[in-house]
Image (spheres, rainbow, N blue to C red):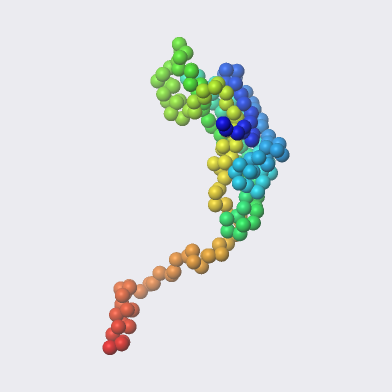
Amino acid sequence: MSAAPEFSHVIDISRVREAPQEVVLSAHAAHCRALAERFDLVDVLALSVQLTVRRGLAASIRVVGTLEARVRQLCVLSGEPFEVTITEDIDEIFMASGDQNDADFDFELAAEVAESAEFVDDGRIDLGELSAQILGVSLDPYARAPGAVSQTASIDTAPPEKTSKTSPFADLATRIKGRG
């Protein structure tokens, strides 16, 4: 049994028409707290999504828009929280798994659309969960605050290369000759 999505806005795909439908979603404080916990963030300060939903080719549903978020993450170097602004374009295609039974269904066109489509079994698309997933994959798992410097910077850098064209063993040979 899966938990209910933290940020849910479900649409019934049977009600989507050819004319574009505008959908604007904005996360409330409770949504932001739940999403911050889900994605292990200090805070989700704001999350808004502007979408256009319409029927597409081969009985598909196309969802296009933009996600904008402000989150607070921990810097992997300093451990200090810092603010990140995220802007992501959304362009997703959904198909009802039963649509291939329609009499006017174009299988050739559907094959092209299906390569990038996500199939929906229950006839519903959760635009809020889609937005949450896009936010999740947009986060930098190794986020660094601006100006943060690694405590191991001297270890992380390679030693300077020698400009001498001598063999790396030339110094050793010189030392051995000096002993004897």
Kindly give the residue lying farthest to the top in the view shown.
Answer: 103
Relative height, residue 130 to residue 169 (above, below): above
> Can I make out residue 50 in this image?
no
The residue lying at 48 percent from left, 65 percent from top is 157
**Label tally:** 0
Between 33 and 75, the residue placed more toward the observer is 33
Whole-percent x and y of residue 29? 71, 39
Residue 44's image quarter?
Answer: top right
User: Which quadrant is home to the C terminus?
Assistant: bottom left
> Can I make out residue 3 in this image?
yes
The residue lying at 42 percent from left, 25 percent from top is 112
Q: Is residue 121 left or right of residue 131?
A: left
Between 147 and 172, the residue placed more toward the observer is 172
The residue lying at 70 percent from left, 38 percent from top is 30
Whole-percent x and y of residue 146? 61, 56
Whole-percent x and y of residue 98? 48, 18
User: Which quadrant is home to the N terminus?
Assistant: top right
Kindly give the residue lying farthest to the right in the view shown.
Answer: 29
Whole-percent x and y of residue 89? 56, 36
Kindly give the residue lying farthest to the bottom in the view shown.
Answer: 180
The residue lying at 43 percent from left, 17 percent from top is 106
Between 54 and 119, the residue placed more toward the observer is 119
Relative height, residue 131 to residue 141 (above, below): above
Q: Is residue 179 left or right of residue 137?
A: left
